[in-house]
Amino acid sequence: MGYKRVKFNKKGFDELEYKKYFSQNQAEYIRIKLRSVKLYSEGIEFEDISKLLLIHQQSVRKYVSEYIADGFKGLCKKVKRPQSSLLTEAQSLEFKTISLSKRPSEVGLTGNIWTGQIMCEYLKKTYGVYYQYECHLCSVN
C-alpha cells in the first residue's frame, strides 16, 4: 500500500459529502477533481484514473493531495486568476477615488453619472488607456 493511500485511508471518504459538493459545483474542472478523488476512494490507481478521465496522472495525484490536506472544501476552491490591467496600481486607485467622489461633469466630461462609456472616455483622456466598451443591452459600441 502506497504512502498516499495510507494517508487517504486515514482521512476517509464521506459519500454523502461527496454528493453534496458534486451537486453544488457545476464547473467541470471541479467535478473532474471530485471524480478523481471518488475513483481513488474506490481503490483505482492514479494511472487508471488519468486514463478514465483523460487527464494527466500528475493532476490526479495533485487532486488527491489537495483532498488529503483540505478535504472537499479545499478541493472545490474556485481558481482565481488575476486579471491584468492597463493601469498602474496608483492610477487604478486614483480612478476609483475620482469615480466615487466626483461626477463626470466635474472632470470635464458630459453627464452626471458614470456609465461604462463615460468611464472609457475618461480613461482614454486622462491616462491614454483605451478600454473598449460594449453595451450588450442596447447594441451600442
Image (cartoon, rainbow, N blue to C red):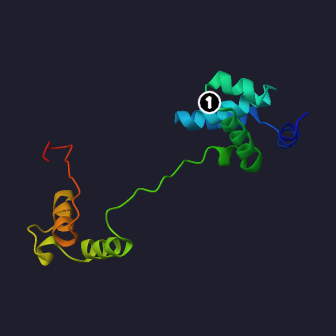
Mark 1 surroundings within 10 Å by alpha-carbon count, few (fewer than 14), some (14 through 19), many (20 or more): some
Q: Residue 23 sits in which quadrant?
A: top right
Identify the secondary structure beneath mark 1. loop
Q: Is residue 31 visible?
A: yes
Q: Is residue 11 left or right of residue 30?
A: right
**The N terminus appears in which quarter of the rendering?**
top right
Image position, residue 13 (x, y; %): 79, 36
Q: Nearer the viewer, residue 70 or 64?
A: 64
> Relative to 84, does residue 41 appear above or below in the rendering?
above
Image position, residue 108 (x, y; %): 10, 75
Image position, residue 36 (x, y; %): 69, 32
Q: Nearer the viewer, residue 58 or 132?
A: 58
* Residue at image location 10% in from the left, 70% down from the top: 109
Q: Is residue 87 left or right of residue 127?
A: right
Q: Nearer the viewer, residue 48 or 8?
A: 48
* Residue at image location 54% in from the left, 48% down from the top: 79
> Relative to 83, does residue 104 appear above or below in the rendering?
below
Residue named by callout 1: 55
Amino acid type, label 1: Ile
Q: Residue 10 sits in which quadrant?
A: top right
* Residue at image location 85% in from the left, 36% down from the top: 5
Q: Nearer the viewer, residue 15 or 58?
A: 58
Image position, residue 3 (x, y; %): 87, 41
Q: Is residue 114 visible?
A: no
Q: Is residue 28 left or right of residue 65?
A: left
